[in-house]
Image: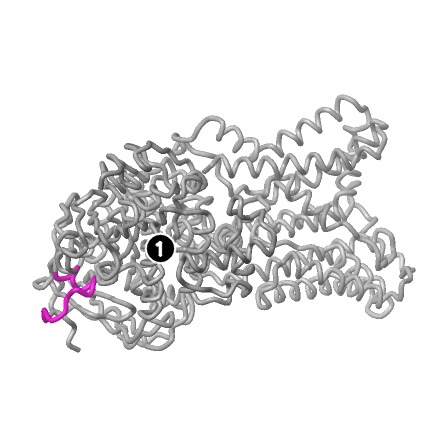
Amino acid sequence: MTVPEVETPLTPGARRLSSSWLRVEAVRDYGIVFAFLAMFITLSLSSPVFLTSANLLNVLNQSSEVGIIAVAGTLVVIAGGFDLSVGAIYAVGGVVAAQTVPDIGVPGALLAGVLVGLGFGICNGAIVTVGRINPFVATLASQIIVRGIALVLTGGTLITVTDPSFATLGQGSVFTIRYAVLVWLGFAVIVALLLGRTTFGRYVYAVGGNAEAARLSGIRVGLVRGVTFALSGLAAGLAGVVVASRVSTGQADTGAGLELAAIAAIVIGGTSILGGEGAIWRTVLGVVLITLIGNGFNLLNVDPTYQQIFQGVIILLAVGIDAWARRSRR
Amino acid sequence: MATAPHMELRNVGKRFGGVQAVADLSLSIDRGTIHALVGENGAGKSTVGKMIAGVHRPDAGELLLDGRVVRYHAPRDALADGVTIIAQELALVPQRSVLENVFLRSGRASHLTARDKRQRYAELQEEAGFEVPADVRVASLRVADQQKVEILKALARDAQLIVMDEPTAVLNSAETERLFHAVRALRDRGTSIVFVSHFLEDVLSLVDTVTILRDGKHIRTGPAAQESPETLVTGMLGRTFDTSFPEKVPVAQDAPVVAAVRGLCAAGFVKDISFDVRAGEIVGLAGLVGSGRSEVARAIFGADKRDAGDVEVAGEAVDIASPRDGVRAGIALLPEDRKGQGLLMQRSILDNITLPHLDRVSAGGVVSPVREQKAVDDLISRIGIRASSPAAKVNTLSGGNQQKVLFAKWLFGRPSLLITDEPTRGVDVGAKRAIYELIHSLAAEGVGVLVISSELEEVLGLAHRVLVLREGRLVAEFDQSQMSEESVMRAIFAADAGDGEGLAS
C-alpha cells in the first residue's frame, strides 16, 4: 500500500521515557500491523483456500461498503467527531439511486445517490458546528430522521431496478477485480492523500488534537469539522450506491449497524477515538482484519456464533491499548 | 503560646519541574488565628497553602499538626485531620443544591437522614455566623455565597484549619466585608485560617499574623498590626536577580508604530486601554493575575471578542473578529497555556511550526514537503530548538524547547506585532536566557513585542517601557528612566497613592 503515513515513530528524544511506556506505545502504533499479519499467516497456514486470489478478492469485495464508510469516518474521528448516521445515509443513497434510474438514467442516478449522501453530510456538519450540538447526539438523531426519509421515499417496499446496466458498478469487474474493490481502494488513496498531503489534512489533525490551539492558529475549526462530516456523508452515499448496484435494489432498511462496524474498524486500526491521531492505512487494515475474521470463521468451519465475541474482544483490546498508552504518558 | 502550634512546617521544599517553588521554608500557624501568606506572583503562597492541605506533597521537610508529624498523600488525608482548602476554583457541584453540596462526602454526616441534615445545617449556619438558603442550586448563587457554601462544607467536615486561596479575588468590597465577617466568626470559635491573598489592604484589615514570602522563601512573620501596605511591599521586593538579561537596544527615534490600540474594552472588566507599540520596541505588560493582562492580549489578537475599541497594525485600521483575522493582520499571540492553547502536543515539531501559515509552503492546498522541510530546518537552527529531528513529537521535548517551538511557529509568519504571554513559564533557567535573547533579536529585526509576565524582573529586564494594569485599567506607564522594581510594584499593588507615578492621560 502506498498510502502515506503522517505519524512519525518515536525518536531518541524520548530518552526519559520508561521502556514500558515505549512498549505500550509501539503496540498502539503498530498493533494493527502485528494483528493483521498474525491473522493473515494463521489463515494461510490453516486453510488451503485462503491464499487464493479468488478468496482474497472476495474478502476485499465484502469489505468495500464498510471500507468506503470507514475511510471517510477516519477523518471525522481524527477531527474529534463521531458519525452515527452513515448507515441510514447509506440506505437513502441506494434508494435514491434505484428510484431515479428510470428518470435520469444510470450514471445520473448513481451520481444522485452520492450527492444525496453529501447533502445529508453537510446537514450533519452544520448541525454539529453551527448548531453546536454534540456530534454523538446530533448524528444519532439525524440517523433516525434519514432512515425515516428513506422509508417515506420507498413506502416500505423494495425498489427493484430492471435496467441491467445499473448493476455494472456493483457486479462488473476488470481482470477479475470488482469495480467495487477499485472504488473502495481508490477512495482510500484519495482520502489518504487528502489527509497526509494537503493543508486541509493538517487542519483535521490540529482541530482534533487541540481545538483551541487550532483556533488560535487561525484555523476555522467549525469549517474543518463540517467538511469531515460532509465527506463522511458522501462516502456513505457512495457505499450505498455501490451496494444498491450490486443487488439491483434500493432498500430503506439496509445498513443498520454499519456505522458501528465502521467505527470498530477505525478503532481497531489504531486511530484514537479522542481525536488528533490516526491514519487512513490503519483503517484500511482494520476493515480488512474484521472481514478476515469472518472469512476465517467460514473457511475453518468455526461456529459463526462465536464471531461476534471475538470481534468485540479485539475492539476492547484496541481501545484499551490506546487508553494505556495515553495514561502511561503522564 | 504554651501548646504546640496548630500547624507547623519545618524546612519544607517543593519543586515543579525545573522551578523551585518553595525552598527550606519553616512556618507556624497558631490555633484560632487568621494567618496571611503574602508575596508576589510565583512567590510560593499557593504552593504552601496546598502543601498544608495535602494537595501537593512536599519534596523535603515535614509538617506537624499539634506537634505530631503528619504526611498527607491526598486532600482526603488532610481532611481526616480537620485540615482543608478552599481553592480559587471552587469545588462545588453547580447543578446540585446547597444542602447536597455541604454534605457531599462529609464522612459521618453524609449518612444522616434528611431531617437530621437540615438540623445539622442549621447548626453549621449558626456556627459560621451566616446563612445561605439550603435548597437553591449552587449555580444560581453569586460567587461570594458559593464561597460561604464552601466554608459550610468545610465545617460540616469538622475542619479545624481552613486554607483560603485568594478568596476575595472575584468579590466586590461589600461581599468581601461579608466574607471577612464570616471568617472572623470562625476564628472566634477556634478555627485556624490560612489566608492567601494578593490584596494587601484586605489582608491587613482581616488577619492577625502576616508571613511574607519571596521566591519560595520565608522573609518574615509578624503581627499584622505592625505592618502597612508599604512595609509589606518592601518585604516582598528585593529579590535577587538570578537570571541575567541581554542588554537593551534603544528603539530608534523614528521607529514607526507597528500596533496602536485605542479604547480597548474586553471581557466585561477591561476598560479603555490605549497604547502604541513601535517597531523594535519591547513593551512590558505588568499586573496581578486577574488584572486583565491576558484579556488585553487575547482581545487584540481576536481570540476573544472586543467589547469596544480599535486596533491599528502598521498604520492601518484592521477589523479583527477572530484569531484568523489576527493572524492575517500580522499579529502573533503566544498564549500562556502552552499545552492547552499553544501546541499540538501529539504532533511533530514540523506540523506545529507551519500550522498557522501552511499556505506559505503549499500550492493549491497541497503541502510541499520540500519547502516545508526547508522552512522548518531554517527556523529550528535559527531559534536553536534542540530535538532529535523535526519529526519529533512536541510532547517529547523539554519545556524550554516547547516554548521555542511556539516562537518558531509564530515567527514563520513574520509578524508585525508579537504578543507573548508568560514566555518563560515552566522553563528552566538556562532556557530562559535563550528565550530572552530571542525576544531581543526579534525586536532588533523590527518586530514590535508585547511581553506579559507575572515575573516582575522579567518585565523590567526585557521591556523598554512598562504598562501596569490593575482591575482592568491601565493605571501607570513607566519608561526606562522611571522604571524601578519598587515603583512598578507599588503601581501593581495599588500602594502608589500620591507618589506621582500615575498615568496622567
Residue B73 drawn at (x, y percent):
41, 35
Residue at 71% from the left image edge and 28% from the top image edge? A40
Query: Within 10 Å of the Cα at label 1, are there few (<14), some (14-19), or many (20+) other Cα atoms?
Result: many
Residue A196 drawn at (x, y percent):
53, 48
Vertical placement of A93 versus B19: above or below?
A: below
Q: Which residue is mark 1?
A: B186
The quarter of the rendered structure image containing the C terminus of chain B is bottom left
Res. A50 visible in picture: yes
Residue at 65% from the left image edge and 65% from the top image edge? A122
Seen from the viewer's position, the closer of residues B160 and B139 is B160
State how many labels appear.
Answer: 1
Vertical placement of A154 versus B78: above or below?
A: below
Query: Which span of residues is magenta-colored?
Result: B487-500
Residue A242 drawn at (x, y percent):
78, 53
Q: Amino acid at mark 1?
A: Leu
**Magenta-span inclusion, residue B490:** yes
* Left or right of residue A267: residue B359: left
Query: In the rendered structure, the residue with mark 1 lies on which chain?
Result: B
